[in-house]
Amino acid sequence: MENRELQVVVQAVGDLPPMPIVAVKVLEQLQKPDTTAEKLAGIISSDQAVSARVLKIANSSFYSLRRKVTTLEHAIVILGEKTLKSLVLAASLKGINKSFGLMEKMLWEDSLGCAIGSRMTAVWLHGADPEEAFVAGLFRHIGRMVLNNHDPEAFRKVVEAVYNGEGSEEELETLFFPYGHAEVGEAVLNKWNFSEDLTQVARWHHDLTGVDPVESPERYRLVATVQFADAMVSRLGIGRREPDESVDLLSLPSASALGLDPDQTGQLVEEFRSFFEKERSTFLG
């Protein structure tokens, strides 16, 4: 997205949210050559909610650590900087919401569910970097959070109309907002100086045709990974009122792009469902 286009989106939707302050400080610290686990732990511990959630997730079966970690410093040393970045972003995402009612809870569950599903798919298929896939899945619907913050009533009408089968989310958003969540999401991640791969996932996670598989094969597989996880989340009803059993995972362009067969797909969905049920409170609690 060109800077001029970004400004148009900002003017139309209102101020885009700043990145959560703890995440900003951690990302800045990670850029410094003299960074240490101690310095990073000091920054994260300034936000008790974030630091507690980081430790909780680090000790979940998601990372299969051999022994329990009890300090942030220890968690950082064992997990590494890339994973730390994922965890801090996940732990601080909740703070973007202006309020936190049922709609915000569903949006947050949807984001964390897709992050987990994206990482799991990346690990299974070796098609994308697992931590990048986690962050890409986490923020693929950041635009929906912004639209909900901007006009909760209009956003609720869109969600209800989609639920009632009145049209696709993309079509219905244009009736209530000047831009859809994909364009807004791209603008937010652009503002936050995320990589182009991540901004393009936000923009094209519903439409693989927006990414050229020949020109950008790695980006294409990252978008496909997130699109497939997005569909698993819908199919299982994560962050939804109920599961959408009409979702045919094998007919998705992303399933084809990732080379998934029926057996693999069934096993991956079952592993994801089982994990999310077991660790749901760890990530969302």
Image (cartoon, rainbow, N blue to C red):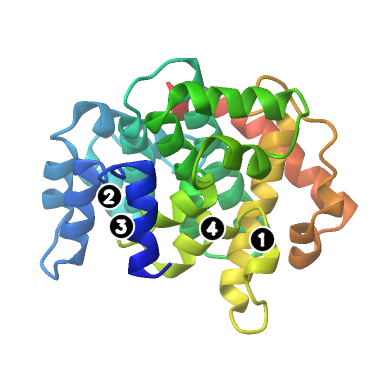
The residue that appears at 54% across and 58% down in the rendered structure is: 203
| Horizontal relation, residue 103 to residue 278: left or right | left
Which badge, 1 or 3, is on the more N-terminal residue? 3
Cβ–Cβ under 8 Å for marks 1 and 3: no
| Marks 1 and 4, the one that precedes in the sequence | 4
Q: How crowded is mark 3: few (under 14 residues within 10 Å), some or many (20 or more)?
A: some
Q: What is the distance, in whole Å, between disc 1 and disc 4 at their CAs?
A: 12 Å
Please state the horizontal and vertical placement of residue 88, each as a whole percent of the image: 31, 44
How many numbered callouts? 4
Disc number for residue 76: 2
Q: Which of 17 and 271 is in front in this view?
A: 17
Q: Do the residues labelled 4 and 3 touch (CB within 8 Å)?
A: no
Relative to residue 166, is residue 62 drawn left or right? left
Q: Residue at x 45, y 61 (%)?
A: 199
The location of residue 72, given as percent across then percent down, is 23, 40
* Picture quarter with the N terminus: bottom left
| Most distant residue in the right direction | 262
Element at label 1 = helix
